[in-house]
Image: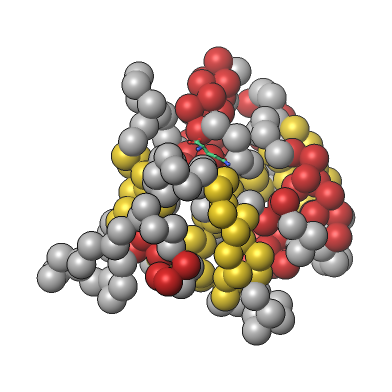
Amino acid sequence: FKNIKISSLQGAFAEHQVMLKKVNVKNKIVVVLVRTQEDLEKCDALIIPGGESTTIALLARLAGVLEPLREFAKTKPIWGTCAGAILLAQSVENAKKGGQELLSAMSVTVARNGWGSQVESFEAPLEVEGLRESQRPFHGIFIRAPVVISLNPSPVDPPLAIISRISASLLPSTQTLVPLDEDDTDPRDSRTIVALKQGRHLLTTFHPELTKDYRFHEYFITECVLPSLV
Ligand code: GLN
């Protein structure tokens, strides 16, 4: 069987590596840090970790990997956590002055630092659909996390699958929910969405790599990476 080479850009590389080592699949999972287009070409999948989205995009551009990343996203799985989730999005609100470059790999709009400046970080138990032992909540660690502002489904893109929502009662009080537009297809406010899958891409606004629970890493490997290898 095949090696799965997961690459990671700057950021919480080591933490993701530790978690991926625990995932029990037949394939050997090799984690490499991507610095160049050649590094990227050797990989089957990519994790874009947390950090600072503007900086990640800038470093990617300086290293000449921004365009190669956009190409990569067209055929291979990418998981973005927190800042990485911002990069996966189609559009972003509350970007830094000077703008934010995106990969536009998932049909969503997110707001950077969307929980407001008072609430820098918080933790919350999450129910996640499709996770092993899904009745056991996943501990969500949110650090200056983005918020999903809207889902922008299009008939030519794979469907968006919401796999976790934060309970509205757990939303920080600075984040007020407004009623949805009548024509919105989403029955509840999109801002409660914290994990989303679209085709082979995965977005989490929190940090699974900062827990000891590797079920999300297992999910990415089995639901996104392995199906893309066939
Ligand atoms: N607020 C950061 C950004 O805008 C993301 C924070 C994180 O990844 N923990 O990029």
In the picture as drawn, the residue positioned furthest to the left comes out as 182
Residue 223: x %, y % from top left: 63, 67
Say which quarter of the image contains residue 40. top right
| Residue drawn at the location 32% of the way across and 53% of the way down | 149
Q: Tell me: residue 182, above or below residue 63.
A: below
From the viewer's side, name the closer residue of 214 and 70.
Answer: 214
- Observer able to see residue 64: no
Residue 3: x %, y % from top left: 82, 52
Q: Tell me: residue 4, above or below residue 180.
A: above
In the picture as drawn, the residue positioned furthest to the top comes out as 62
- Quadrant showing the C terminus: bottom right
| Residue drawn at the location 60% of the way across and 35% of the way down | 51
Q: Is residue 94 left or right of residue 140?
A: left
| Residue drawn at the location 48% of the way across and 39% of the way down | 87
Say which quarter of the image contains residue 175. bottom left
Residue 179: x %, y % from top left: 20, 67
Q: Is residue 217 left or right of residue 176?
A: right
Q: Tell me: residue 74, above or below residue 52.
A: below
- Quadrant showing the N terminus: bottom right
Residue 211: x %, y % from top left: 74, 57
From the viewer's side, name the closer residue of 109 and 144.
Answer: 144
